[in-house]
Image (cartoon, coloured by chain):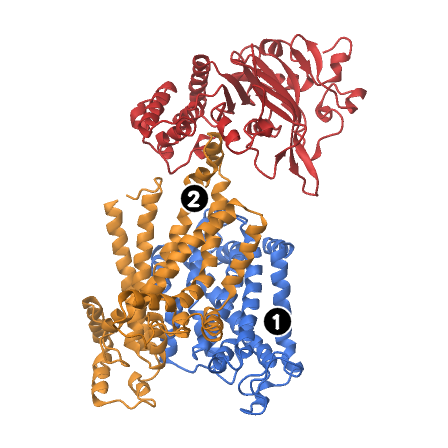
Chain colours: A blue, B orange, C red
């Protein structure tokens, strides 16, 4: 556990990591409090009234085709994007860790079978997998969408954790624990899991950026977060037909994505260097 | 070596088999009767209904469905597309060239410019150039490809009118305008999507190469090379880069499938008639056979690319000799 | 005898963890005459490897050679050379053998290829000619079955064979000076003797000056003309070999000799030098050996210069001026 705390501290000391962490905290803060401070965009819907206004007083980021304040929508979208990515990544990392731990430690037929499955799943590009699932069940409710995204993202983590376990299994203290007769579950949770937390956290942090981009893309295709729930990808989709008239409605949500993913990656990078300092 | 190759091929075949099974199960897991869903808001002709009935063989037991699916795949028959009414293989074959063109261009850019920049960064580590390029590449990672595409299409294609904002060819260009004009037309249409896709992907290549080079540059044999009096360029490229290739070979292997799967988002935004936009469109139409076909193709490519990577490793690194 | 290498006040600095820089090599000076063998002896951490790297300007950044240092190769100021001029002395005027041949050879090129590279970097010969010369070099270094080994990869050779390759590479451009940095440390004892024999033979046949860097006093005897003992970034004693072995004067040198187990004579307790080498970031003030020195006294609080002890024999210790020493 202390190794993890040390890694986090080192990541904080790194100027990139600190920038990323601060930005993320800011975005999370805005996502939490923002919607309470800003007018609810859902109430503003009016195809004519104040549509497609350029940025200015009253609409600092402009308004979209349905007269909704872009700033308010971007802020609301932050909530959704962050929530989706955090929960989905948590799900992926947990599943991946479990499978990786079990597979790596038990070895034998269980390991072989699980890894065959993982290999096959990894061979199919994640986006295609999602497209397949989403074709079968369009218009998913948000929790189900999160579930689907989460369950398609654990394969790489499983591989990673398994590799770590295989390496750690040979370490002296694990052998000692086994020699003392510790039962398998104890070895896994007490000795192996804590030492994989570092790489897991790195995978998770970097995964957040990936999922945000993925969800945005799906929403852009109309397959992800469904209206009226605001999402950055969905906003860009809505802005497409009127891009010439109101480019701001499409540009700002995109910028929001860039800043958020960048922050997550900055922090994840710094964390990765702290956990495994090579080629910094 | 031959024995290892055979074993490896067998492994790949098994993995592919599992992929087929996985896809099959995934489709069967779709809740409800697939046919009833298909009828949702889409009037279907009696022919279509008959086709899909045959495709899904819903009245046959699961085992039989699986077997006929597997044999179909073995024969190269991926069924017929629901939306297009044509064999999936035909449709894929038609859309393939466009994707190859886009993917190939992006791959080329990445593995020439990307690698070169990565090496430069490593050799000039810590310099202002290095730091700028790192920041730029981190930013590049974070940009959604569809958004960048949209912005570029709007800015360059619509506002500035320098390049066409979409499509692969100009429909108004007559067919007998000569091969040069036609090629130029396609090239003009290729620029924006290729630029978009390259921008968001080059970051990864640069970072991989930089990191690999940095690891190699600190090794003792680099000092030996300099102590011999070798030129700095020889030290960088002959000694260091040759050894820093390995992670890049892996990366290339991961990317090869991109050649054919294209990018779903970029192709959609630029209306580029490739496999990516095909897949995106197939979702709305619930064209399961088409989706399955493209997924199968993608997976097959990934597996093949991984195998090629392993072979490349054994050729590049004399320490690796499989038995 | 002409002077071929002249090092004066060499200082190599590194950035300190808390800002500023510290000196891993602090005011080192020695000379080398044509055909002479000088042994640079010291424990790990005293800066001897850095010294050898400095001769070829290969000190790894963020280390750097401080101004005020001078390295003169046959009159040429090595520290003033740049680019092509610098490249031309590497390998051609000074050849270097590194400590660990496994990591010092590029794993993806054949051994012959790497030797030939050393030749073609300095002589305009064809590939075929370079290959021939490489073969002859392998024969010279006593490689068993040299023709076959020419196309072998480093990982296919044993440690002793790899070190022979390193020697061949160092000799490829026929340098006047050979720097051997711990040439036998990474090898098995039986192989060490063979490699040393190769070095001796080649030194004589090529008439090279040799800078032999080692922590092992045993390989110095009978091989080096002069010895310089290093401690904490400085030379603390230098003398012709016979004199040093007969009359080690600096307390550190005496400690080194006392801590070597002897096969002949009565079995005695080993006398290690108490304490440990101070880190370069925190050299003690005054004489750097003072904290560990059994003969430390009041004057030791000031840094002693190199003082004469006998003909060609100097040491960095105030005891040289004390009556009745050492």
The residue tagged 1 is A28
Residue lying at the far right in this picture: please name it: C298
Residue B115: x percent and y percent? 44, 51
Image quadrant for the N terminus of chain B? top left
Query: Crowdedness of circle 1 by 10 Å Cα count: few (<14), some, many (20+)?
Result: some
Name the chain under label 2: B
Image quadrant for the C terminus of chain B? top left
Q: Name the secondary structure under disc 2.
A: helix
Residue C189: x percent and y percent? 45, 22
Above or below — where is C122 with respect to A19? above
Mark 2 or mark 1, whichever is nearer to me = 2
Residue lying at the far front in this picture: please name it: B177
User: Observer-nearest residue: C111 or A119?
Assistant: C111
User: Observer-nearest residue: C232 or B272?
Assistant: B272
Above or below — where is C215 with respect to B136? above
Disc 2 and disc 1 on one polypeptide chain: no
Please give the label number shown on residue B241: 2
Residue A115: x percent and y percent? 36, 59
Q: Name the secondary structure under disc 1.
A: helix
Above or below — where is C158 with respect to B280? above
**x 50%, y 70%: residue:** A212
| Quarter occupied by residue C57 | top right
Left or right: residue C181 compared with residue B174: right
Above or below — where is C293 with respect to A87? above
Q: CA distance from mark 2 to mark 1?
A: 42 Å
Name the chain under label 1: A
Q: Is residue C48 visible?
A: yes
């Amino acid at each position: 556990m202390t190794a993890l705390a040390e890694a986090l501290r080192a990541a904080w000391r790194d100027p990139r990591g600190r920038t990323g962490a601060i930005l993320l905290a800011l975005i999370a803060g805005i996502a939490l409090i923002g919607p309470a401070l800003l007018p609810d965009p859902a109430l503003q819907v009016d195809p004519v009234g104040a549509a497609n206004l350029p940025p200015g007083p009253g609409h600092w980021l402009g308004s979209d085709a349905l007269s909704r304040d872009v700033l308010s929508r971007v802020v609301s979208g932050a909530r959704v994007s962050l929530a989706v990515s955090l929960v989905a990544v948590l799900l992926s990392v947990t599943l991946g860790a479990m499978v990786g731990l079990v597979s790596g430690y038990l070895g034998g037929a269980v390991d072989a079978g699980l890894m065959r499955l993982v290999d096959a799943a990894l061979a199919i590009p994640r986006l295609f997998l999602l497209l397949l699932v989403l074709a079968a069940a369009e218009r998913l409710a948000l929790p189900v969408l999160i579930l689907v995204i989460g369950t398609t993202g654990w394969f790489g983590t499983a591989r990673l954790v398994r590799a770590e376990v295989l390496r750690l299994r040979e370490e002296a203290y694990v052998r000692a624990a086994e020699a003392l007769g510790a039962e398998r579950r104890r070895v896994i949770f007490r000795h192996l899991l804590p030492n994989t937390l570092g790489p897991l956290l790195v995978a998770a942090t970097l995964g957040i950026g990936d999922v945000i981009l993925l969800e945005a893309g799906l929403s852009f295709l109309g397959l992800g977060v469904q209206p009226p729930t605001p999402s950055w990808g969905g906003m860009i989709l809505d802005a497409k037909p009127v891009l010439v008239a109101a480019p701001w409605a499409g540009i700002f949500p995109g910028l929001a994505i860039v800043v958020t993913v960048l922050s997550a990656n900055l922090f994840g990078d710094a964390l990765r260097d702290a956990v495994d300092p090579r080629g910094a | 070596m031959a024995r290892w190759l055979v074993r490896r091929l067998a492994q790949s075949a098994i993995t592919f088999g599992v992929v087929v099974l996985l896809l099959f199960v995934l489709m069967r897991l779709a809740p409800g009767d697939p046919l009833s869903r298909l009828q949702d808001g889409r009037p279907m002709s009696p022919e279509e209904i008959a086709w899909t009935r045959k495709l899904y063989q819903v009245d046959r037991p699961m085992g039989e469905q699986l077997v006929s699916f597997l044999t179909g795949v073995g024969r190269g028959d991926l069924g017929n597309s629901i939306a297009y009414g044509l064999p999936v293989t035909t449709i894929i074959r038609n859309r393939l060239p466009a994707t190859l063109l886009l993917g190939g261009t992006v791959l080329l850019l990445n593995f020439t410019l990307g690698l070169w920049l990565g090496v430069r960064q490593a050799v000039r580590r810590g310099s202002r150039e290095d730091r700028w390029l790192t920041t730029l590449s981190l930013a590049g990672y974070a940009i959604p490809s569809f958004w960048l595409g949209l912005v570029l299409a709007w800015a360059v294609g619509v506002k500035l009118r320098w390049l066409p904002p979409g499509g692969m060819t100009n429909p108004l260009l007559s067919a007998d305008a000569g091969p040069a004009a036609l090629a130029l037309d396609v090239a003009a249409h290729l620029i924006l999507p290729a630029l978009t896709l390259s921008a968001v992907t080059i970051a990864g290549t640069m970072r991989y190469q930089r990191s690999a080079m940095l690891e190699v540059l600190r090794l003792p044999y680099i000092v030996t090379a300099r102590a011999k009096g070798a030129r700095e360029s020889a030290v960088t490229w002959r000694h260091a880069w040759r050894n820093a290739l390995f992670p890049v070979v892996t990366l290339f292997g991961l990317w090869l499938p991109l050649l054919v799967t294209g990018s779903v988002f970029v192709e959609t935004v630029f209306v580029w008639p490739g496999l990516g936009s095909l897949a995106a469109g197939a979702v709305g139409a619930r064209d399961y056979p088409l989706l399955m076909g493209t997924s199968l193709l993608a997976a097959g490519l990934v597996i093949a690319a991984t195998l090629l990577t392993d072979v490349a490793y054994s050729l590049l690194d004399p320490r690796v000799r499989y038995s | 005898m002409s002077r071929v290498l002249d090092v004066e006040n060499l200082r190599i600095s590194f950035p300190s963890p808390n800002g500023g820089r510290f000196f891993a090599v602090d005011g080192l000076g020695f000379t080398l005459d044509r055909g002479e063998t000088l042994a640079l002896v010291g424990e790990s951490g005293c800066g001897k490897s850095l010294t050898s790297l400095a001769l070829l300007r290969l000190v790894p950044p963020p280390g750097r050679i401080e101004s005020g240092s001078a390295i003169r190769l046959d009159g040429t100021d090595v520290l003033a050379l740049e680019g092509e001029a610098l490249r031309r002395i590497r390998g051609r005027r000074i050849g270097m053998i590194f400590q660990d041949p496994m990591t010092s050879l590029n794993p993806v090129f054949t051994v012959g290829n790497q030797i030939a590279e050393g030749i073609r970097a300095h002589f305009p010969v064809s590939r075929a000619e370079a290959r021939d010369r490489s073969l002859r070099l392998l024969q010279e270094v006593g490689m068993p079955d040299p023709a076959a080994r020419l196309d072998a990869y480093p990982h296919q050779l044993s440690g002793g064979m790899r070190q022979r390759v390193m020697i061949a590479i160092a000799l490829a451009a026929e340098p006047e000076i050979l720097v051997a940095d711990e040439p036998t440390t990474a090898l098995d004892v039986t192989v060490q003797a063979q490699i040393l024999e190769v070095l001796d033979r080649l030194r004589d046949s090529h008439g090279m000056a040799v800078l032999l860097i080692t922590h092992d006093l045993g390989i110095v005897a009978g091989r080096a003309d002069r010895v310089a003992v290093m401690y904490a970034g400085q030379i603390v004693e230098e003398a012709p070999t016979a004199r040093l072995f007969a009359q080690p004067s600096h307390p550190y040198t005496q400690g080194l000799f006392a801590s070597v187990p002897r096969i002949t004579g009565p079995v005695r307790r080993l006398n290690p030098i108490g304490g440990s080498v101070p880190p370069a970031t925190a050299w003690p003030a005054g004489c750097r050996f003072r904290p560990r020195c059994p003969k430390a006294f009041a004057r030791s609080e000031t840094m002693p210069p190199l003082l004469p002890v006998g003909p060609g024999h100097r040491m960095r210790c105030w005891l040289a001026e004390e009556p009745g020493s050492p």
